[in-house]
Amino acid sequence: MLVVDTALRILYAEGNLFVRLGVDMREVKGSLLRDWTGPDRWVVLGPRYEAALAGEQQSFERWERDDSIYSIEITPVRDGSGEVKSLLVVFQDVTERARATRALERSEARL
């Protein structure tokens, strides 16, 4: 889980996303999100974050090079006047679920 401000600076980070990358979570806080994603990922993820900053909830799955799959939810957090002040980002590794679903679909197709 991440909380980022409107400049996409990481305010809060929890979970194993960065740990899997070998990153100490203390290094993450205060840094820009795009510095951790790399340019190839940012091309895909950047527009999603921009849409969320414009107020649109984002929900999608992202395949990684190691064949892991993440379900990603980006939720705008608004202040009392309705202005987006930050984003709540939740990542969930859904690799095993996706593999099981694909195997089931293949099995049903054979039947």
Image (spheres, helix red, strand yellow):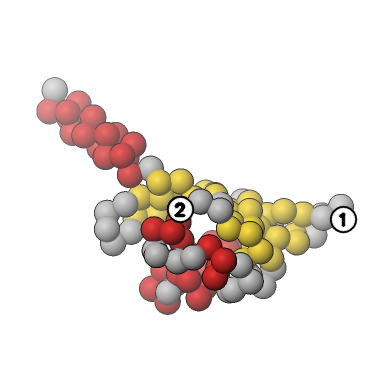
Q: CA distance from mark 2 to mark 1?
A: 34 Å
Which structural element holds mark 2?
A: loop
Taking the spot 21% from the left edge, 34% from the top edge, the residue there is 103
Q: Position of residue 27 (x, y in %)?
A: 54, 70
Residue 53: image quadrant is bottom right
Taking the spot 69% from the left edge, 68% from the top edge, the residue there is 6
Q: Given this view, does label 2 or label 1 mark the residue nearer the observer?
A: 2
Residue linked to disc 2:
16
Q: Is residue 69 placed above or below 40 in the rendered structure?
A: above
Q: Is residue 19 toward the left or the right of residue 55 in the image?
A: left
* Residue furthest top as drawn: 111
Taking the spot 31% from the left edge, 52% from the top edge, the residue there is 68
Q: Are marks 2 and 1 in contact (CB under 8 Å)?
A: no
Q: Nearer the viewer, residue 19 or 90?
A: 19
User: Tag on residue 54?
Assistant: none
Residue 26: image quadrant is bottom right
Q: Is residue 99 toward the left or the right of residue 83 in the image?
A: left
Residue 104: image quadrant is top left
Taking the spot 44% from the left edge, 59% from the top edge, the residue there is 19
* Residue furthest right as drawn: 81
Residue linked to disc 1:
81
Structural crowding at the residue carrying mark 2, measured as other residues with C-alpha within 10 Å and reported as few (<14), some (14–19) or many (≥20) = some
Q: Position of residue 72 (x, y in %)?
A: 49, 51
Which structural element holds mark 1?
A: loop
Observer able to see residue 54: no
Structural crowding at the residue carrying mark 1, measured as other residues with C-alpha within 10 Å and reported as few (<14), some (14–19) or many (≥20) = few
